[in-house]
Amino acid sequence: MKTAIVTGGASGIGLAVAERLRSQGYSVGTIDLTSTGDDPLAQAADVTDRAQVDTAFAAIREALGPITILVNAAGVDGFQKFTRLGFDEWYKVIDVNLNGVFHTIQAALPDMLEAQWGRIVNISSSSAHSGQPYMAHYVSAKSAVNGLTKSLALELGPQGITVNAVPPGFVDTPMLRTAEGRKLLGGTVEEHIQRTPVRRVGRPEDIAAACAFLISEDAGYITGQILGVNGGRNT
Ligand code: NAP
């Protein structure tokens, strides 16, 4: 029985990934900023805080055993004209989306190295392919996650660990609908659908399906890849 940790596993894409992996028989723990109840498999931790990340990993490891699968879905968006973008706002978006991935991968690696087997999937963003006005901080962080993915794939391949990224396009989650409600998307979701080749918004389950494949045994020869799941936008 393999054990996975999904960050951001209480909402949107991460939630769909956690549910998909559970349905396939994986043991799954989640890490989110806020988490209700005292379920040891649903840890509250800030991915930007290494001590909190280490504590959450230890609790899930204690409950489920060594962690050999990691899906990094925790993230925050950000919208600001670059001339008005303060360093604090820049840094917060970089901190969660990039430094958070640094911390969780480092926390997961000892178990993977011990097992000489591991799967890491980082949820980046299709905006890293195209760029996006008013999202310089977010796009910078997600582009760096793609670069981190490629570098670690080379470094960790000899130890049986694959590292891939899935950059979603528009996926119907609380993050997307909040941005739509604040009129930050440059149009409604419906208008974006008309510019999407497959003519629908992405579903969290679309991303979960790609993650499930990338962590499977069948995907053992696939590493360092940026697998766009975006209905044909920004490919
Ligand atoms: P979401 O519904 O807002 O979920 C984000 C999750 O991340 C939440 O569970 C949140 O926890 C968690 N999180 C945020 N900051 C955190 C922190 N500092 N420490 C720990 N957990 C934290 O968003 P989503 O749309 O599913 O996004 C998932 C990932 O996909 C993100 O990395 C996002 O950038 C990426 N993405 C999404 C889209 C899209 O169209 N939806 C497109 C491209 C990329 P709490 O709920 O406890 O705050």
Image (tube, grey):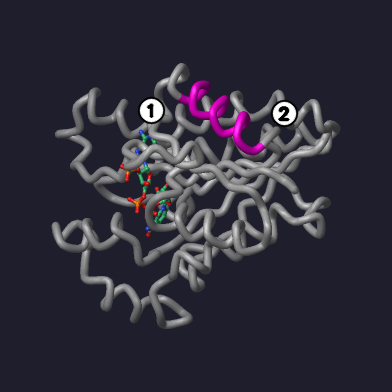
Q: Position of residue 84 (x, y in %)?
A: 15, 34
Residue at 22% across, 37% down: 82
**Above or below for 116 versus 175:** above
Per the picture, the main secondary structure of the magenta-coloured stretch is helix
Residue at 61% across, 62% down: 210
In the image, taking residue 62 as reference, residue 80 lies left or right, namely: left
The residue that label 1 is drawn on is 95
Residue 76: mark in rendering: none
Residue at 28% across, 50% down: 133
Question: The residue tagged with tag 1: helix, strand or loop?
Answer: helix
In the image, taking residue 75 as reference, residue 151 lies left or right, namely: right
The residue that label 2 is drawn on is 111
Which badge, 2 or 1, is on the more N-terminal residue?
1
Of residues 125 and 42, the one nearer the viewer is: 42
Residue at 74% across, 39% down: 118
Local packing at callout 1 (Cα closer than 10 Å; few below 14, some 14-19, many 20+) is some
Which residue type carries mark 1?
Asp
Specify the segment rendered in magenta. 53-64
The single residue placed furthest to the top in the displayed view is 51
Which residue type carries mark 2?
Asp
